[in-house]
Amino acid sequence: MLFGVIISLYRSILKIKEIVVYGTVVNVIVRAILTFIIFQFTNDILYFIILEIFTQILVLFIMLYLFNKNEFKIFLKSDYKEVIHDTKMIDYGKKMFYNSVVSFIASQGLSIIIAIKLTSSDVGAYNILLTLTGLTTFLLLNLNKVFAPAISKLHHAKKVS
């Protein structure tokens, strides 16, 4: 969920190149290198799940750091006393936290089930097929990342009806 928020922040300021470079290219390269290194030493598929989580967190922190550094500060210093008595904000925070937990479990659930139920060669074949079928999604998402903000900008300028 946080990854989607960071992507939306970059899209809002039309930084499409950064989304593609860090969100896709760096992610794929780091995952491929670490997968190659890890499977040279072990066949345990649990390491692949840990690797997936690690690369997502790494790319998230890279994108968050660069956005915070180059564009504008997201994290401002504040004191907990500002919100400790605001029950409306605390309730909203709880809902967002529970939503994030459910989203994380749902997104990682398939990987965990596959790792438990299939052999390592079947998981490898599954990941290859998933990568091939993901190519269409990759192209579609990146085209939408480029054209959606551009069309929105043109529509706002009344150049597209």
Image: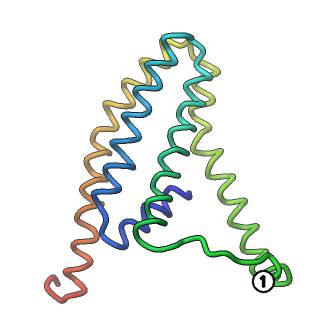
State the scheme by which the image is colored. rainbow
- The amino acid on which the numbered mark 1 sits, given as a three-letter code, is Glu
Residue under the point 43% across and 68% down? 9
Q: Is residue 49 left or right of residue 62?
A: right
Question: Residue 82: x and y, percent?
Answer: 78, 83
Residue with the most extreme right position: 85
Quadrant in the picture for residue 10: bottom left
Residue under the point 15% across and 82% down? 160
Between residues 49 and 58, which one lies in front from this camera angle?
58
Residue under the point 36% across and 26% down? 129
Question: Residue 85: x and y, percent?
Answer: 86, 83
Residue with the most extreme bottom position: 158
Number of callouts in the render? 1
The residue carrying pointer 1 sits among few (fewer than 14), some (14 to 19) or many (20 or more) residues within 10 Å by Cα, namely few
Q: Is residue 103 above or below residue 70?
A: above
Question: Residue 52: x and y, percent?
Answer: 53, 34
Residue with the most extreme left position: 159
Q: For numbered disc 1, what is the local secondary structure?
A: helix
The N terminus lies in quadrant: bottom right
Q: Is residue 33 left or right of residue 3?
A: left
Q: Is residue 122 above or below residue 76?
A: above
Q: Is residue 99 above or below residue 58?
A: below
Mark 1 lies on residue: 82
Residue under the point 57% across and 44% down? 107
Q: Is residue 40 above or below residue 61?
A: above
Between residues 140 and 45, which one lies in front from this camera angle?
45
Between residues 88 and 76, which one lies in front from this camera angle?
76
Question: Residue 81: x and y, percent?
Answer: 83, 80
The C terminus lies in quadrant: bottom left
